[in-house]
Image (spheres, grey):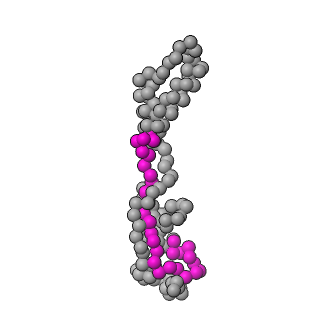
Amino acid sequence: MIYYGRKDDELLEFTEKDEAIEMILDSYHPDPIPKMLELVKFQKKKITATDINNLAEFVNEYAFERLEDLYGNFEEDHSPSSKLKELSEKFANEYSKAFNVLQCEEISSETIDCVKWVKENASSWLEEGLKFRE
């Protein structure tokens, strides 16, 4: 999913470029708006293979230790079987796919000429007395 906003926006909610520009410029009301705007394009971060592998190891170690404590043989030292490791890897992969990633990363940015954008997309703002910063 692609999002648009300013570099320092804490919440990215716009998936359409023109909607983002309109709402950002509208947020300046009633103050004059800037003549130029730096618009950033973001995408959700992807969970890395390293993080998935680390999750699989964590799940495998924690689950094994827990079950070993509750049901294992205290006289012998055991380690997880290859089958348990495989199940942990499948779990980590599926869990990562289902996880709702909320953090985004910048993929590009562009400078928007706000005067031109308003003339082309929101000319009624000019009729209503919109002013640009000097």
Residue drawn at x 47%, y 33% as measured from the top left: 57
Residue 134, compared with residue 44, is above or below; it is below
Residue 6 is situated, as x and y percent measured from the top left of the image, at: 49, 67
* Figure disc tally: 0
Q: Nearer the viewer, residue 128 or 109?
A: 109
Question: Does 27 sit above or below residue 4?
Answer: below
Magenta span contains residue 57 = no
Q: Is residue 105 visible?
A: yes
- Magenta-highlighted residues: 24-52
Looking at the image, can residue 118 be seen?
no
- Residue 31 rendering spot, x and y as whole percentages: 58, 81
Quarter of the picture containing the N terminus is: bottom left
Residue 116 x/y as whole percent: 41, 81
Identify the residue at image location x=50%, y=53%: 103
Residue in the picture at 51% in, 84% down: 132
Relative image position of residue 62 (x, y in whole percent): 54, 29
* Residue 129 position by quadrant: bottom right
- Residue found 45% across the figure and 54% down from its top: 44
Residue at the limit of the structure toward the top, as seen here: 75
Q: Using the image as rendered, state which of residue 114 and residue 134 is in the foreground.
A: 134
- Magenta-drawn stretch contains 39: yes
Q: Is residue 6 above or below residue 66?
A: below
